[in-house]
Structures are given as structure tokens and as C-alpha cells.
Image (tube, grey):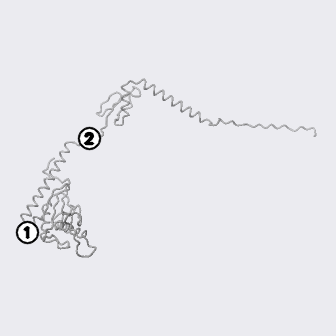
Amino acid sequence: MADEVAPIIIIKRIKKVSAGHHGGAWKVAYADFVTAMMAFFLLLWLLGSTDEEKLEGLADYFQPTLATLRTNSGSDGMLGGTSLSTDGSQSSGITAVEIPSTPPPEDSADQEFDSKIAEFEDAQLTAAAEELRQAIQDSAELAEHNDQLIIQQTPDGMRIEIVDKDQRAMFRGGTSELHDYAKAMIKAVAEVIEDLPNRVAILGHTDSSTPIGAPEFTNWELSANRANAARRVLSASDITPDRFSEVTGKAATEPIFPDNPRRAENRRITILVLREAPVLSPEFER
């Protein structure tokens, strides 16, 4: 047993060798570089084999103010084929169509029609103003109050104002109770504007005096109450509710005489017949 030889054991160790500091990434980068170079030389070849006319068409294609309508069909290469123009006709190559930077002018027929509508509305408002002036002058009750009526044609519409005069107030002092003659004047306005399609805005104005009463009752409340009093008279005179655009109290913010804010004329009711596209009568033809 002492002469037995111990078995020999051989251990093999396999050493893994890495591909280097960057591994195989350089191969991917090299492949991308080769692909890019091939595409670059292909582009140079295509540009060199294309005539000058097609090159100009290509340059026009990339202008920011131009657009190109074309189809992909054709056999003339990258820049060949069939293009479609704006009139529907076909032509070879690239067709550049200029896009206008400003919208096309409005059709002259539409402009003429809009002008006729504006003229028709102006004629209606002017006729209504003359009719109202004549109605006040012809009334035995209202003729003496003719100087309290102010009518103006403005860009917003026909402005009808009934103003106070010294010793001739529309409302009882510090209240929204109308005197009889003021009610009659507002009814006369209603008779004139009743057949017009335009909407109506009512504004109440006061002077700068402080109203007598509770401290919280200011010219804002007073002017709004007076505007509503005028609206109620118009409503009772067949002006339908849908005709009223707004009823507003302006207090003393818009005096006729800013240098004399307590002057009587600053106390007034404004009835504004708004200027807007009217509903045309059947006899009005385009």
C-alpha cells in the first residue's frame, strides 16, 4: 500500500477575453457612418444627373410661401412623374403654386348687398327720427316740451334722449315716478319704434346731487329705477320683452355738461335704438 501512486488532477481555467474597452459598439457606429456616406454620394450623383430646370423646381418646392401639388406616379425618376395644377390640369415635373399671404377680397356682390342693407337701415332710422319729431310738435300736450327731446344718429344707433329742464322735471324729486307728460313722450317714442326690428337699450342718468333718503340709496339705485320706469312704459306700449337689450343705471357718470354736473339737463333717460342688421321687409330686394 505504501507503493500506491496518488492520481494526478489537472484543472483547466478558461480565461474570457473582452472585446476591448468599447466592446462592439464601434461596429455599429462604423456601419452608420458607411450608410451615411453612401446616402451622401447617392445624393451627389442624383443632383449631378438632374437638369437645371428640375433643380429650380426643387428649390421652389422648399420656399415657405409655395406649395406643390403632385402625384407619385410616373417614370422620370425622383423629380419626374405627373403634377396636378390648381386648375385640375396635369403637367410633367413639379408645379409650384403660390399661396397668397392675404385673404382674397370679399366678393363685390356681397359688398354691394351689405352696403344696401346699411343704407336701408339708415333710411329707417332717419325716417323714424323725423316721425318722432313731428309727432311731438303736432301734440298739443307735448309741443311745449319739444326742447326736451334730443335725437342723434350715432355709430351705435339712434339715440333718443328725454332731458329735464329747469322747472320741468320728468320724475318727481328723488323718485322714479314719472310725470304725465314724460309718460306721454315715452309712449310717443314707443309708437315710432314699435315696427322697427332693432333692439333697444335704456339708460338712466342723474345729476351729481345726492338723493334724499336712506344713505344706501344712491344715484346708482335712482338712475336704475328710472331706467326701469321708462322700460315699463315702453312695455305697456307694445314693445315686446325680447326687444330690450339692456336697462342700465349710469348715475352721474356721463353728464351732458361735465363743467356743470348739477345742471338739470344731466338728468335724462336715453333710449338707444341699436344699429344692427335689420329684418328686411318683403319689398326690399337684393
Q: Residue furthest right?
A: 2
Image quadrant where residue 106 sits: top left
**Where residue 174 sits: x, y (%)?**
20, 73
Viewport quadrant of the N terminus: top right
Q: Amino acid at mark 2?
A: Pro
**Where residue 95 sits: x, y (%)?**
33, 31
Which structural element holds mark 2? loop
**Where residue 205 sits: x, y (%)?**
21, 66
Image-based side of 46 in relation to 236, left or right: right
Which structural element holds mark 1? loop
Number of marks drawn: 2
Q: Is residue 117 above or below residue 58?
A: below
Circle number at residue 207? none
Image quadrant where residue 158 sits: bottom left
Disc 2: CA contacts within 10 A as few (<14), some (14-19) or many (>=20): few
In the image shown, does 77 or 181 lie closer to the viewer? 181
In the image shown, does 199 or 135 lie closer to the viewer? 135
In the image shown, does 77 or 22 lie closer to the viewer? 22
Image quadrant where residue 98 sits: top left
Circle number at residue 141? 1
In the image shown, does 36 or 3 lie closer to the viewer? 36
Earlier along the polypeptide chain: callout 1 or callout 2?
Answer: 2
**Where residue 144 sits: x, y (%)?**
8, 67
Residue shown at the point (14%, 61%) measured from the top left: 150
Disc 1: CA contacts within 10 A as few (<14), some (14-19) or many (>=20): few
Q: Amino acid at mark 1?
A: Glu
Residue shown at the point (30%, 39%) measured from the top left: 101
Image-based side of 158 in relation to 33, left or right: left
Residue shown at the point (7%, 63%) measured from the top left: 137
For disc 2, the marked residue is 104
